[in-house]
């Protein structure tokens, strides 16, 4: 996932939201033909797999 500046990879800090908030039904690729439908419980166990900071744009791996 592309993490824009102003989001943190892990836990919210200093008033910045975690990048996981960007994963939601409104941001789903419109040509996705999978049978998987977004459920909020999909997000419960996601954790950032990097240490990128809020001042940097980066690719964030959530696993």
Image (cartoon, rainbow, N blue to C red):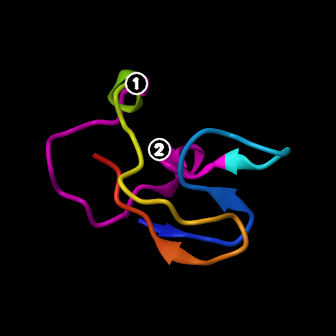
Q: Does the magenta segment cover residue 35? A: yes
* Magenta highlight: main SS: loop
SS state under label 1? loop
Q: Position of residue 31 (x, y in %)?
A: 28, 67
Q: Is residue 42 above or below residue 62?
A: above
Is label 2 or label 1 in front? 1
Nearest the viewer among 3 and 8 is: 8
Q: Is residue 57 above or below residue 17?
A: below
Q: Residue furthest bottom?
A: 57
Q: Quadrant of the N terminus?
A: bottom left
What crowding class fits label 1: few (fewer than 14 Cα within 10 Å), some (14-19), or many (20 or more)?
A: few
Q: Quadrant of residue 55?
A: bottom right
On residue 36, the disc is: none
Q: Which residue is mark 2?
A: 25
Q: Which residue is mark 1?
A: 44
Question: Residue at left 65%, top 77%?
Answer: 56
Left or right: where 19 falls relative to 32: right
Q: Is residue 46 above or below residue 8?
A: above
Left or right: where 9 falls relative to 47: right
Left or right: where 57 falls relative to 58: right
Q: Position of residue 57 (x, y in %)?
A: 60, 78
What is the magenta range? 18-40
Question: Residue at left 70%, top 72%?
Answer: 5
Q: Does the magenta segment cover residue 27? A: yes
What crowding class fits label 2: few (fewer than 14 Cα within 10 Å), some (14-19), or many (20 or more)?
A: few
């Amino acid at each position: 996932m592309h993490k824009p500046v102003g989001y943190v990879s892990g836990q919210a800090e200093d008033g910045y939201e975690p990048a996981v908030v960007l994963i939601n039904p409104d941001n789903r690729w419109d040509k996705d033909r999978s049978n998987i439908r977004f459920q909020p419980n999909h997000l419960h166990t996601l954790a950032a797999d990097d240490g990128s900071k809020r001042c940097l744009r980066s690719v964030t791996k959530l696993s």
